[in-house]
Amino acid sequence: MNQELNYKASSAITESIQVKTKLLEQCTGQIETIGKKLANALQKGGKILLCGNGGSAADSQHLAAELVVRLRSQINRKAIPAIALTVDTSILTAGGNDIGFENVFARGVEAYGSQGDVLIAISTSGNSENVIRAVDEAKKRKIMTIGLLGGSGGKLASQCDESVIVPSNITARIQESHILIGHIWCEMIEEILFPELFLKK
């Protein structure tokens, strides 16, 4: 039985554009402020840790790769230290089995985090318990915490030192904006850390 598909790709694209327009109007200053703080921490010898669940775990890996390797293929620069706490299946499964899944990212912060580092906590709801506990552990270690959030910002909005809250309640649109924000931060970090590579000739 053939049924006509009612889904319209144009609606999703329009919705994404609308969310990004709100992001432009409401969050540009905060995005730039955080980008500078990330670069400053790296200039002082710190590193960036990232965590999140599901799509946010993928975003953690994506952004760590952009920093460690590079974002722009024409820019040859040194590696930037970044670790996604989402990538080691042995650690995640051992942690989930032995200390509870709610503690797996906090354990990663304990293992790899030091004062002067930054933790980027990614959660579309702002209420992921394992991300909240990672932020708590980071604070104990005097690690700056950055929330990449959505909707109301959830519990993490008040717990993180700085946050960008994407103005949408739709998970897919929030995630699309998260990777845009992450790319902006990567671009800012590259240009602040390696200004000589961006001089106009």
Image: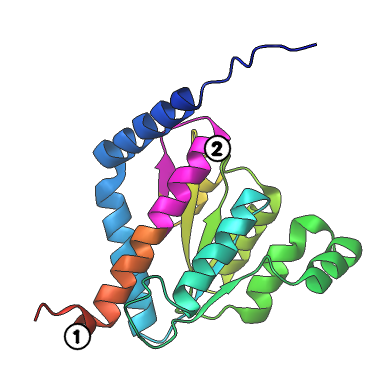
Which residue does the image show at 41% across and 87% down from the upper left? Answer: 45
Q: What's under tag 2, amino acid-wise?
A: Ala
Left/right placement of residue 21 relative to residue 47 reads left
Which residue does the image show at 37% across and 70% down from the upper left? Answer: 38
Most common secondary structure along the magenta stretch: helix
Above or below, comparing residue 124 to residue 83 in the picture: above
Which residue does the image show at 33% across and 72% down from the upper left? Answer: 189
Left/right placement of residue 89 relative to residue 57 reads right
Q: Earlier in the sequence, mark 1 or mark 2?
A: 2
State which quarter of the image contains the N terminus: top right
Give how far apart the Cα atoms at labels 1 and 2 are: 37 Å
> Would you say residue 48 sits in the magenta stretch?
no
Q: Position of residue 112 (x, y in %)?
A: 62, 80
Q: Contact, CB < 8 Å: mark 1 with mark 2?
A: no
Q: Position of residue 29 (x, y in %)?
A: 24, 50
Q: Quadrant of residue 166?
A: top left
In the rendered image, which residue does mark 1 sit on? 196
